[in-house]
Image (tube, rainbow, N blue to C red):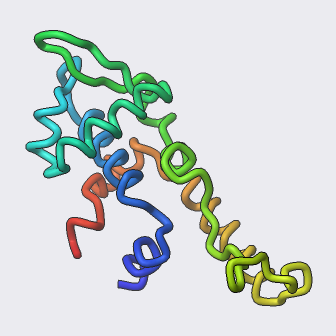
């Protein structure tokens, strides 16, 4: 339960990043050459407009190949071992930052001397290190390919 609060209430992982990871895991599990967006919408229960936008972005970033026409769809551009959660965070969220040190819409003047900020920075580095080891292959291997959002 603590992890769920940490991941979603602090927006460590956004909806777009979650949907992207779910779609990539789904594609990686398939044995056929490509997977249609319609199939993913039905299987993953992701709203079509969100999924279409995410798949376009993933294609533009080079993580997916798209094939148009009958029998077309999406396939991974890279091996599943080389697509990391941190890639998706970079694409959909820019960075992970646990503490922005903003006070009344201005940068906090105590940033350089704040003991709490130093502790949070250390936690942030640990989180980034751990997230940096999560890839599509590890999620499929560990049976975690379904989002924790589904278990709310």
Q: Position of residue 41 (x, y in %)?
A: 14, 42
| Residue 42 appears left or right of 72 | left
**Residue at figure coordinates x 42%, y 34% from the top left:** 57
Image quarter of the N terminus: bottom left
Q: How many marks?
A: 0
Q: Position of residue 88 (x, y in %)?
A: 48, 45
Up/down of 66 relative to 142, above or below: above
Outermost residue on the right side: it is 113
Q: Position of residue 59 (x, y in %)?
A: 40, 26
Q: Position of residue 32 (x, y in %)?
A: 18, 21
**Residue at figure coordinates x 71%, y 84% from the top left:** 103
| Residue 67 appears left or right of 76 | left
| Residue 46 appears left or right of 24 | left
Outermost residue on the bottom side: it is 115
The image quarter containing residue 76 is top left
Outermost residue on the top side: it is 69
Image quarter of the C terminus: bottom left
| Residue 28 appears left or right of 72 | right
The image quarter containing residue 112 is bottom right
């Amino acid at each position: 339960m603590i992890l769920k609060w940490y991941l979603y209430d602090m927006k460590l992982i956004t909806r777009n990043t979650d949907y992207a990871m779910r779609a990539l895991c789904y594609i990686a599990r398939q044995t056929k050459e490509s997977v249609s967006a319609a199939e993913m919408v039905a299987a993953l229960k992701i709203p079509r407009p969100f999924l279409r936008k995410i798949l376009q972005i993933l294609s533009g970033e080079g993580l997916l190949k798209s094939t148009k026409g009958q029998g077309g769809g999406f396939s991974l551009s890279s091996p599943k071992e080389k697509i990391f959660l941190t890639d998706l965070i970079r694409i959909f969220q820019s960075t992970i930052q646990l503490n922005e040190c903003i006070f009344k819409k201005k940068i906090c003047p105590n940033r350089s001397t704040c003991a709490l900020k130093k502790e949070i920075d250390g936690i942030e580095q640990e989180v980034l290190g751990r997230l940096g080891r999560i890839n599509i292959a590890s999620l499929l291997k560990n049976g975690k390919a379904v989002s924790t959002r589904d278990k709310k």
